[in-house]
Image: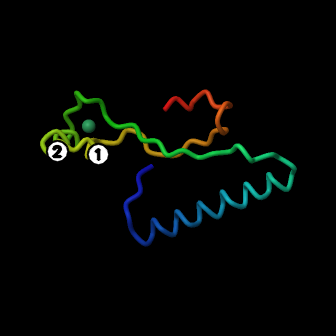
Amino acid sequence: MFFKRGPRERVMLERAMEQVESLLRDMQRQGKDLTHLKFKKYQKTHYTSCTCEKCLEARRTKDPHKRGILEDGYKVFLGPGDSKEDAE
Ligand SMILES: [Zn+2]
């Protein structure tokens, strides 16, 4: 999902936060242990060989942050020791 900065997107984000918070509260009420629950932002950029407009711009300006985004989102995982996905 792509989020540009703007009032509408802000409202969407705030609504999403409220939903996540209330979901977590519900789970906690049900006696689930959420102590080790963590969120991680992740972004997958295009391959270095990509020739789309954004990637070309990134190469021109030597700024890898400008590369095209393939996936942009959040992963929920368990804290240290429990996550197989945590390979950073
Ligand atoms: Zn690209």
Q: Position of residue 68 (x, y in %)?
A: 29, 42
Q: Position of residue 80 (x, y in %)?
A: 64, 35
Q: Which mark is residue 79?
A: none
Residue occupying image coordinates x 21% and y 38%: 52
In primary-sequence order, the first of circles 1 and 2 is: 2
Seen from this angle, which residue lies furthest bottom?
A: 7
Colour setup of the view? rainbow
Residue occupying image coordinates x 64% and y 64%: 18
Mark 1 close to ligand 1, CB under 8 Å: no
Dot 2 amino acid type: Glu
Q: Quadrant of ligand 1?
A: top left
Q: Position of residue 75 (x, y in %)?
A: 56, 42
Instruction: Tell me the residue that label 1 is attached to.
Output: 65
The quadrant holding residue 59 is top left
Residue occupying image coordinates x 44% and y 44%: 72
> Is 7 drawn above or below residue 40 in the view shown?
below
| Disc number lying in front (1 or 2) | 1
Residue occupying image coordinates x 60% and y 61%: 17
SS class of the residue under badge 1? helix
| Drawn side of residue 43 relative to residue 77, left or right | left
Q: Which mark is residue 57?
A: 2
> Is 52 drawn above or below residue 13 in the view shown?
above
| Drawn side of residue 68 relative to residue 44, left or right | left
> Is 21 drawn above or below residue 81 in the view shown?
below
Label 1: how many residues lie within 10 Å, few (<14), some (14-19) or many (20+)? Answer: few
Dot 1 amino acid type: His
> Is 68 drawn above or below residue 85 in the view shown?
below
Q: Position of residue 3 (x, y in %)?
A: 41, 57
